[in-house]
Amino acid sequence: MRHLLCAGFILGLLPIAMGDSGAWAQGDDGAEPGVCTFTAVVTGKYPEDRYVRAEPESDAPLLAQLEGAYRIGNDRFYPEVEITGSENGWFRISEAKTNIYIVETPIRVLFEGEGWIHGSGLDLSVEGSRLMSAPSWDSPVAFDFGAANAVDQESGVFSLNRLVACQGHWVDIEGTYLGQPAQGWTNDTCASQVTTCP
């Protein structure tokens, strides 16, 4: 379970919904299933979590191994990837780069082209209060962080386990919140490692 440096996992900054739903309708942005656009951070602690493969399979040819965390003082920064699609828990990327926010350092491109990273190595912060059961705000709520918090009478932190799938600007995630499993879709994510997004 991982957390980014930003405060996006704190209650009041999250939305999301159910994944692996059998029949996907087009999301409210009109995108096709498995085609998406968003940024994520590669924080997997094992080397294989940072592998970029030629196909969405664990035995596909290895195209690159992304670097691990960069340490600047007491802070850690991770490579960021531009995600363009998903298939069977894998995410297609078009680019991987460094972005060290707190010092003036040129952004380095670590990978360009088409490659695949497994969702267990990816991270992002979720800004909102609910996860949806499909990639649309009109779908049923899959998990309500506010309701879970009210029951426990305390503020909680969402721990992301993995990204599951994507569609348009929506991403299906799973993790835990106050000891409860939470899975669902959100289109309100942030890959900034130092602050929340607008």
Image (spheres, rainbow, N blue to C red):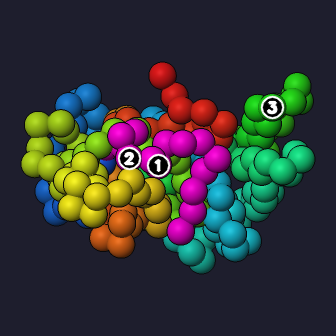
Query: Residue at 52% of width from left, 47% of height from top?
Result: 124
For marks 3 and 1, the one nearer the N-term is 1
Query: Residue at 72% of width from left, 50% of height from top?
Result: 78
Residue 4: x %, y % from top left = 60, 50
Instruction: Give above or below for 105 relative to 148.
Output: above
Q: Which residue is mark 3?
A: 102
Real-space Cα separation, disc 3 to disc 1, in angstroms: 21 Å
Q: Nearer the viewer, residue 107 or 69?
A: 69
Q: Callout 2, which amino acid?
A: Leu
Left or right: residue 41 versus residue 163 is right
- Residue 12's image quarter? top left
The question of residue 8 being in magenta is answered with yes
- Residue 183's image quarter? bottom left
Q: Nearer the viewer, residue 92 or 20?
A: 20
Q: Callout 3, which amino acid?
A: Ile
Real-space Cα separation, disc 1 to disc 2, in angstroms: 6 Å
Q: Which residue is situated farthest in the top direction here?
A: 198
Left or right: residue 79 versus residue 59 is right
Residue segment shown in magenta? 1-15
Q: Which residue is mark 2?
A: 11
Query: Residue at 76% of width from left, 32% of height from top?
Result: 101
- Labels in figure, total: 3
